[in-house]
Image: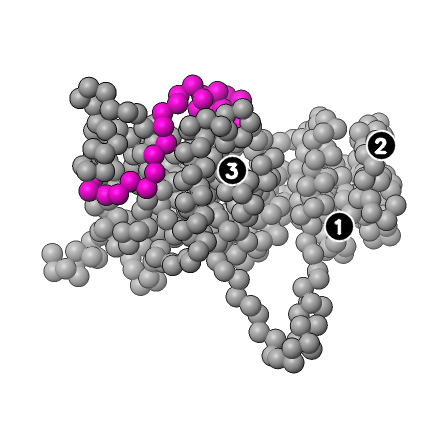
Amino acid sequence: MAGNIRVLIVDDLPETRENVRKLLQFESDIEVIGQAGTGEEAVQMAKEHQPDIILMDINMPGIDGIGASQQITESVPSVQIIIMSVQSDPNYLRRAMMAGARDFLTKPFGGDELVAAIRRVHDKRPTVTSAPARQARQVTNNLPDEPMAAPEGNLIAVYSPKGGAGCTTVAINLAVALARRGRRTILVDGSLQFGDVSVMLNMKAVTSIADLSDRGNELDQDLVSSISQVHRSNLNVLLAPPRPEMADVVTEENIKQLLATLKESFDFIIVDTTSYLSEKTLAILDLSDRIVLIAQQNLSSLKNVSRFFDLAESLEYETQKVWLIVNRAKSKQGKGISVHDVGKALKRPIYGTIPDDELTVSDASNRGVPIVMGEHQKKAISLAIMKVADQIAKELMEGKVSVSKVEPDKPSGLFGRLFSRREKAGG
């Protein structure tokens, strides 16, 4: 049928091919057009039938799935490939993506997982309609064809100088709230060594930011789309590497290139950061349009947040770039520190407060369901986060003023930049 997703199954085991076919036989919008038992046969059938999706096994005699995928991508670029393998090692993932695969399924997988991957890859396939549209506009208006500059997306870093402040919870729920408001939003787990976004969203780290680390000039919207995943809230998610040692392959330059690419495709890029001010974290903060700074009502948090404000001033961040949020806010009890006391002590306006609700946060985290979705979305903590998200959208979308660009002649690194400023001041 004309509207169906046409699928070719490639695996050297006939029983595996048949099992996959059976998983798809009751899907009205998916049609299995053929099966291939070798990489060579897959390449030939791809050229002849030009399917929409190829389900490609990696381990096959002769040309393996990686080699076949590379040949197909070069000869029939419209075909989208999903790799199937019992191996979930990151090296396999990296090789598969470099060969042109758009997704990766680890065997054994269920019917729901398979169908979801096929539809996701098909929906995100590249389109080639922009050139004719540009030509028609030029003839109609009789004007030179000048590309229209698309507005850049808004980069928001969620940061706290003290660990355990709830940055990940705030980042996830802000991102989900924006996505559910119809904003094109992507969440990036910038805690590269020990990121928790995948766990808290109940998502499998099949691909991660590490898969983009060595792509250089290949980094574009299509490649990012193939590596990111889509949460059921319609939020795009770019996960942290699955193992701590893999964080080392992601460089400061990789992060800068990635964030610049994301700003071309999304209205909002929310980055969950680590409290440690590494060069990578500093690059994220430098490039951010806004920093959502998380504070709590205790002296330790106030001390570190105050120091960060001093640092932000030394780094010449504009005042409006940093938004102070009090998380786990509690009403004043006895001689405790009130929310008003926080603002007074820091001499900064408080952009928003998120009430303390440990039971809800714990339940949502354990079940992998964001607070702003499901049974908790009417609770005070959820409404507070959605209010902050709406404030962010209103302020940034009404008229974006970039205050975050770092001049190219500034020294790189935290200490280099601080020392340079001291020299300029004659210190």
Q: Is residue 132 left or right of residue 415?
A: right
Type of the residue with mark 2: Gln
Q: Residue at x 44, y 24 (%)?
A: 361
Q: Which residue occupies the foreground of this view, 270 or 326?
A: 326
Asked if labels 1 and 3 touch by Cβ distance under 8 angstroms, the answer is: no
Q: Residue at x 48, y 20 (%)?
A: 363
Quarter-wise, where is residue 304 in the image? Answer: top left
Q: Which mark is residue 265?
A: none
Q: Which residues are magenta?
A: 346-370
Name the spot of residue 212 as percent of width and height, x first. 54, 47
Type of the residue with mark 1: Val
Q: Which residue occupies the foreground of this view, 23 or 104?
A: 23
Asked if labels 2 and 1 touch by Cβ distance under 8 angstroms, the answer is: no
How many residues crowd mark 2 within 10 Å: few (<14), some (14–19), many (20+)?
Answer: few
Q: Earlier in the sequence, mark 1 or mark 2?
A: 2
Name the spot of residue 259 as percent of width and height, x first. 47, 51
Q: Is residue 100 left or right of residue 353?
A: right
Q: Is residue 12 magenta?
A: no
Type of the residue with mark 3: Val
Q: Earlier in the sequence, mark 3 or mark 1?
A: 1
The reply to whether residue 40 is in sight is: no
Q: Earlier in the sequence, mark 2 or mark 3?
A: 2
Give the residue at mark 3.
176
**Split into 4 quadrants, where in the image is the C terminus?**
bottom left
Image position of 289 with respect to 8: above or below: below
Give the residue at mark 2.
25
Q: Which residue occupies the foreground of this view, 317 or 23?
A: 317
**Split into 4 quadrants, where in the image is the N terminus?**
top right
